[in-house]
Amino acid sequence: MIYKDLRGFIKQVDDLGALRRIGGADQRYELGGITEVAAGTADCPAILFDRIKGIKPGFRVFTNATTTPQRAALALGIDPALSPLDALKAWMKKRETLKALKPAEVSKAAFLENSMRGKTVDMTRLPAPYWHRKDGGPFIGSGAIVVMRDPDGGWINASIYRVQVHGRNKVTVQFDHPGRHGAVIAKKYWDKGKPCPVAVVCGQDPSLFVAGFEYLPDGQSEFDFAGAIKGAPLEVLPGPVTGLPLPANSEIVLEGELLPANKTMQPEGPFGEFTGYYANEARPCPVMRVGAIHHRDDPILLGSPPMKPPRFHFGLPFRAASIWSQLEMAGVSDVVGVWQHVAQLMTVVAIRQRYAGHAKRAGLIAAANSYMGRLVVVVDDDVDPSNLADVMWAVTTRCEPAEQIDIVRNAWSSALDPRIPDEAKAAGVTSHSKAIIEAVRPFGWRERFPPTSALTADEARGIEAKWGAAILGRAPPSRPKPSRPKPSRPKPSRPKPSRPKRRLAKRGKA
Ligand SMILES: Cc1cc2nc3c(=O)[nH]c(=O)nc-3n(C[C@H](O)[C@H](O)[C@H](O)COP(=O)(O)O)c2cc1C
Ligand SMILES: [Mn+2]
C-alpha cells in the first residue's frame, strides 16, 4: 500500500527499521551535521528530529527521507526488497506507463489546523535549519515545493526551489536559472507590474518531492505527476490567501507573494551544494512576503539538504535511468545496467559486448548525457554497476589506461562545477572534460581473458540463502533459540516483518 501522506511514509520507514528519533539537537548546524553523519553510515537511516532547541516541542524535522535505494523505492511505490539495480529498472518501466492524474479538490485540509496570518506571521517559530557552517542563513525550503499558477494557461507548477528565511515574514526563493518554470511564471506577473501569488509547501508527501524535481514540460503540472506515481489524485484545497491549490495533507504551508525582482531583492545564500562545495557568494534573489503560515498540529518539516557525495537526496539515480533509456533509444543493444555514483557525478554502464566498438559507443552516449560527470566507466555484464567495489575491480584489472581511456573535451557541466575556474565561469564557460574508461575485457581476445575465480551473482545468492545467517552470526530460523540472549545483539523491540534481508555483499550507494 502506498503511503497517504508524509506521516504515512515515515510510518513505513519505521516499519522497515530505518528510522531514528533524535531529541534536543540544535537548529544551528546540528540538524545538518547529524543528517550528514547518518547519511555517511552503511545503513543511512532516516532521522526524525523532535524537541529542537529553541523550538516548541512537537515541531519536527525529517531528513534522509529517500536517501537509500530501499526508501527511494518505497517513495515510488516500488517493492523495497528489490536490489538497487532492479528497483531502478522497475522505476524506468513504471515511469514509461505513468498517466497524469489531476488533483481532486477536497473541503477540509489538515494544514489548516493552525494558522498565523498578517501581523502574527512569524517564521522564527518554525524549525528552519542552518544546514552547513558557511550557509548564509536558515533554510525552511531545502526540499520544499514552490507552487505557482501560470497566468496564461492556468496550469499549476510545483517544483523544488530552495527557500531561505530572512525575517518574520520574509523569505527568498532561488531559481538556478531564468528557464525554471517558477522564474518564467513569476516574470509574467512582474512584467504586468504585479506580485506573483506563491505558496511554499513543506512536509509534502514524497511522491510530490519526486515530481518536484522531474523535468516536466511547461503546461504539465507536477501535481498530476505525483498523482500518477501514487495511482490516486492528490487531494488539494484552495489556499485561503492565494487561492492556489494546496496539498491538503501537507505539514506546513506558507502563502504569500513573490515581489517583482526589479523592485525588491535580497542577498541569498551561500548554500552548500550537492557537489560538497559552495558554488557562489551571496547573490540577489526575489523576495516572498509571507502573508500566512498554516501548519498541522505537531508539524513535520521535510529537510533535504545537499551533502558531500556520495550522500545524495535520492537513493536511486534517476538520471542513470534516463541514460539507460537513451542508450536503448540510440540502438545500443545489450545494456544490462546503468548506475551513477558520487551523487551522480560518475556514470557506469554495464553491457554484454557483442562487437568491437560496442563499449565505446555506449561510453560516448553515456558521456554525452552525464550532467556534471567527469567520469564514465563501461563494464562487462558480470560486473554490478551499482556496486562501486565491483566497478573498481573491473577498472583495475580489465582496463589498460594507455589503450582504454579517452577524453572528451568541452562537454556538459554547470556553473555549480567547483573545478571550473572563476575566470572561465565569468567568460560563460560551464563545460568540462570527461574521461571514458573502458573497463571491459578487450573485445578481440575477450574469450582468452583469464577466467574469474569470483562467484557469479547467482552462486553468491545461493550461498547467502543457505549460509547467510551463519556468516552474519545470526541463528538460522530453524535452530532453537539460545537460552540467554547475546548482550551484543539486542533484539528489536517489536517484529519488523517487511524488512528485506540484509545483503552480505555491501551495495554501492548513489
Ligand atoms: C533537493 C533539491 C533542491 C533543489 N534546489 C533547487 C533550487 O534551489 N533552485 C532551482 O532552480 N532548482 C532546484 N532544484 C532543481 C529543480 O527542482 C528541478 O530541476 C525541477 O525539475 C525544476 O522544475 P521546473 O522545470 O518546474 O522549473 C532542486 C532539486 C532538488 C531535488
Ligand atoms: Mn515544471
Image (tube, grey):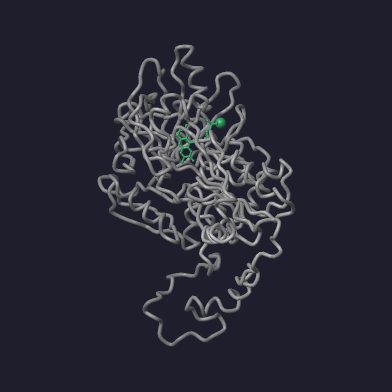
- Between 434 and 134, the one lying in front of the other is 434
Q: Quadrant of ligand 2?
A: top right
Residue at the far left in the pictured view: 54
Q: Residue at x 49, y 24 (%)?
A: 178
145 left or right, relative to 88:
left
**Residue 291 in the image, given as x and y percentages of width and height:** 38, 26
131 left or right, relative to 360:
left
- Between 293 and 356, the one lying in front of the other is 356
Instruction: Confirm whether residue 472 shows in the render.
Output: yes
Residue at the far top in the pictured view: 192
Instruction: Confirm whether residue 322 shows in the render.
Output: no
Q: Split into 4 quadrants, where in the image is the N terminus?
A: bottom right
**Residue 259 in the image, given as x and y percentages of width and height:** 40, 20
State which quadrant residue 135 falls in: top left
- Between 23 and 242, the one lying in front of the other is 23
**Residue 329 in the image, given as x and y percentages of width and height:** 72, 41
Q: Residue at x 45, y 12 (%)?
A: 193
**Residue 172 in the image, given as x and y percentages of width and height:** 38, 29
Q: Residue at x 58, y 23 (%)?
A: 154
Q: How many marks?
A: 0
